[in-house]
Image (cartoon, grey):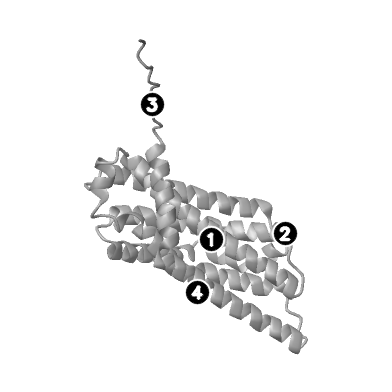
Amino acid sequence: MDAAVVAPIRYSRWLPYWAVLRTDIRQTLRSWVYRLWVVVTILAAGGFLLYRFGVHREAGIVQPSAVHTSDLIRVIALGSLALIVVLSVSAISSEKGTLADSVLSRGISRYQYFMAKWHARTLVVIATFSTMSLILLVAFHFLLADDLTFRGSMAGVMTLSAMLAAVVAIGVTVGAVANSTVVGITILWIFLYGTGILMTLLPNTFPTPEKMLSRLPNVLRGSYDLMSLSDWVAGGAIVAIVAGVFGMLVFSRKDV
């Protein structure tokens, strides 16, 4: 009787990466920091929208959507930085106690582990911020004066998403290098404030976050320089990639 032929088991070298990526996304969506961010943002945005809509209906004052929407989205982006910093820094630093088991006992390299954490936090932050921003844009489009454009709305969301993606990448890197989450958060805030101060000294032609945020109402109306926005998005992507690669290299040589 012929022996049964057993098919060889195929092993994907990226299977551990996908496993950690999916697990981290689920954990992030269930974390109290993430839920607090979403709940506070929805309540604040809903209250602001109802107030502007009431003024528009009762007083008959024309409420340009682009101005108020840009103000609200800018406040959401800047106000969310505190919780986004915690989410990004804690991606690796919060697992210091089990990090050795995760890397050494589960067959995943440090490079894949870092990339999975980095990409998971970036996906969650960008997807959540983009979804909330687009919902607000649709609400302002129908409830207030219509001066928003689809192309401008997408460009405005992409502009702020590029900035947040860079912050997340830097935060994950700092969390991987720092010895604790608290130390990592402190270092990241010092870096962000210091970078913001240094950017005020740059020439007027250099695109800084403050200048891009001030132009956001015109961007939402569809009046913007495509080349300038492309450079800004590309710059954010480059910063995120450089920070991620640097953090990955340092993490690969760090004791766990």
Residue furthest toward the bottom?
59
- Dividing the picture into quadrants, the one containing residue 97 is bottom left
Q: Which amino acid does label 3 sit on?
A: Ile
Q: Distance between the residues labelled 4 and 2?
A: 26 Å
For marks 3 and 4, give the CA distance: 48 Å
Left or right of 104 in this view: 50: right
Question: In the image, what residue occupies the spot 63% across and 54% down?
Answer: 228
Q: Do the residues labelled 4 and 2 touch (CB within 8 Å)?
A: no
- The residue indicated by pointer 1 is 128
Q: How far apart are marks 3 and 2 (CA)?
A: 49 Å
Point out which mark residue 9 bears.
Answer: 3
Q: How crowded is mark 4: few (under 14 residues within 10 Å), some or many (20 or more)?
A: few
For marks 3 and 2, give the one nearer the viewer.
3
Residue of label 4: 40
Numbered disc 2: secondary structure: helix
- Residue drawn where x is 42% and y is 47% of the image: 21
**What kind of element bears circle 3?**
loop
> Which residue is pictured at 26% across the width and 50% down the height?
99
Is 32 drawn above or below residue 62 in the view shown? above
Q: Which circle marks residue 150 in the picture?
A: 2
- Tell me which numbered mark, 1 or 3, is placed earlier along the sequence: 3
Distance from label 1 to label 4 (Cα)? 13 Å
Q: What residue type is labelled 4?
A: Val
Q: Which of 189 and 127 is in front in this view?
A: 127
